Image (cartoon, rainbow, N blue to C red):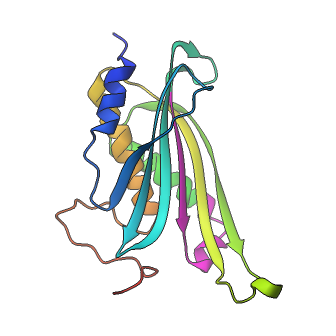
Amino acid sequence: MYPVAFDELRSRILDYSWSDKLEVREIPAPTRVSPFSVAIEGSVSIRGDELGSGRLILLHNPSGSDAWEGTSRFVAMIRADVDPSMASDPLVGHVAWSWLTDSLTSHCAVFHAEAGTVTSVVSRPFGRLAADPESNHIELRASWTPVLSATEDVDSHLASWSDLCLLSCGISPAPDEIATIPPRRAKLA
């Protein structure tokens, strides 16, 4: 198997055609974790109301990493506002983790050594902050080692991350040409 060049992967990530439901831009990538990296940030909004955001970083070390079990590693973080009932549901962690693994599997992304956490935050303001609205959100932090035999193999991982961003915000990752009903928490114009 011929190793895929990092510059080709970086270009492929930055030139990827994202869903129109997800606004993506390049952000500064970490420089101390690996010799090569690229990072993007995406936000999901409906009618100007941001429902969630995420980051995706591709780390690459041609020498490999025992911890990664490979030469490349995706690191993802997703944060999304959720209904209070979902934030307090004891199964929310299992559900959010399944969004990641199901997305990777549904796009035929080849990966291994996946790891991560799901955090549910329920914030209730008190005292001088009592007038502030309650806040309920989930955060998924995950990493996995992609198997990239060819540059285009990265596409399945990008499509998976896109789906993960949308699913965490309660939006079906249906193709752009199919109209969907916005999630209940989106403000109606």
Left/right placement of residue 34 relative to residue 5 reads: right
On the image, which quarter does residue 173 sit in?
bottom left
Residue 176, position in %: x, y?
21, 61
**In this view of the protein, can residue 108 be seen by the observer?**
no
Left/right placement of residue 170 relative to residue 143 reads: left
Left/right placement of residue 83 relative to residue 122 reads: left
Residue 72, position in %: x, y?
49, 24
Numbered range of the magenta stretch: 73-93
134 lies above or below 16: below
- Residue at (28, 41) in percent of width and height: 16
Which residue is most to the bottom? Answer: 131
78 falls in the magenta region = yes
On the image, which quarter does residue 63 sit in?
top right
Question: Could you tell me which quadrant the N terminus lies in?
Answer: top left
- Residue at (35, 17) in percent of width and height: 4
149 lies above or below 99: above
Q: Foreground: 2 or 102?
A: 2
Residue 107, position in %: x, y?
32, 43
Q: Foreground: 132 or 103?
A: 132
114 lies above or below 9: below
Residue 25, position in %: x, y?
38, 47
155 falls in the magenta region = no
- Residue at (63, 25) in percent of width and height: 32
